[in-house]
Amino acid sequence: MRTLAILFIASAVLIPPPTAIAADTGPLLTKIKAVGKEGAGNVEATKAWQDLVKLGPAVLIDTLTALDDADPVAANWLRSAVDSIADREINAGKPLPVDKLEAFIKDTRRSGAGRRLAYEWLARVDASTPKRLLPGMLNDPGSELRRDAVAVAIADAQGLLDKDDKAAARTAFKKLLGAARDRDQVDVIAGKLRMLGETVDLTAHFGFIPRWSIVMPFDNTGSKGFPVVYPPEKGVDLNAVYKGKDGDVRWKEVTTADPYGMVDINTLLTKHMGAVAYAFAAVDSDKEQTVQVRAGSNNAIKIFLNGKEIFNREEYHHGNRMDQHIGAGVLKPGRNEILVKVCQNEQKDAWAQSWSFQVRICDDIGGAVPFKVRDEKPKAPSEEKK
């Protein structure tokens, strides 16, 4: 009896009661989320991380929830805490709180990163998880789980195609196109639909802006033009004439036929080195909506929405990928202005000649939002003389 009593007391010391765990979790998570770049707060965060992990699976949901507003540095600490707790339990042959994990995954108020992590652990201990949950996640608000759901549905639709059920496959792929957000998956779906005789408008699907007014070149000799506030940044007048790098410059209308909205300035206008170009588009929104303005460009770039700078990156020839630059803002009801500054430097290497950009407007998981490009364009010089 005495031995049993000692064991009971020891276990009570090692495993805190739920109320104690709840009281301890908050301060520990706060210290972890306070960790900064370049080691700031690492000592406190390390101790808090160790104490958090000791509390075991009872703190999994609180830790996953903390990912909702964690910055990237703190998120790495929190993910590792979840992994350490879950891995230790599994290796010890103990069960994870599967019901709570599933409820967390289904709670769309939580962050996509946290729900995805919970999903991975649930799938590890319950093989039925993908089949049970993913079919209902085609329109999930988190891109992390939506992507998995689309991947499974693509395989199912391909199965219909393999059985030569073209009508059912066409319906399935059309549904998938509306759900897909990632370019690689969209390209696969679009290819299947075209093979089935359907027309796919990728420009509209992604929300690319294909029509712009562009004025250039302004001086970027020695890469000095990026911080310079040239006249278009002070307010756009499509009929204005500005003093450019080599003389007077004026706006010209440009429309790209590229389905991904890529505007090749060298080809559509004129090639320049050590130069700045401004691209302008006005768009109508039928309501106020929070959006992301996403750009791809191999050049230094700034993005302005309604006169406010929402993104900048002064780096040249770092590769050109869709959505590599993301600025956030709000489209107001009615007319909105988008201005993009694209700077080319003077590198002579063949791979450094690109001067191009693509811009789209979407929500925070990459779905196109409703907008319409306004038919605003500069007058031709001949029209001004009339």
Image (spheres, rainbow, N blue to C red):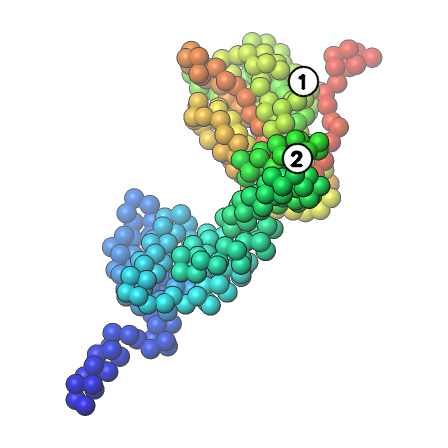
Contact, mark 2 vs mark 1 (Cβ under 8 Å) = no
**Coordinates of residue 40 in the picture (x, y in percent):** 29, 49
Residue nearest the observer in this picture, 367 or 99: 99
Image quarter where the C terminus lies is top right
Can residue 70 be spotted in the picture? yes
Judged from this view, the residue extending furthest toward the front is 163
Pointer 2: residues within 10 angstroms few (<14), some, or many (20+)?
Answer: many
Q: Identify the disc placed on residue 252.
A: 1
**Coordinates of residue 340 in the picture (x, y in percent):** 58, 28
Q: Quadrant of residue 160?
A: top right
**Coordinates of residue 149 in the picture (x, y in percent):** 55, 49
Q: CA distance from mark 2 to mark 1?
A: 36 Å
At 48% from the left and 24% from the top, the residue drawn is 298
Judged from this view, the residue extending furthest toward the top is 246
Can residue 26 be spotted in the picture? no
Callout 2 amino acid: Leu
Pointer 1: residues within 10 angstroms few (<14), some, or many (20+)?
Answer: some
Q: Is residue 27 left or right of residue 5?
A: right
Q: Identify the disc placed on residue 193.
A: 2
Closer to the N terminus: mark 2 or mark 1? 2
> Dot 1: what SS?
strand
At 59% from the left and 11% from the top, the residue drawn is 270
Image quarter where the N terminus lies is bottom left
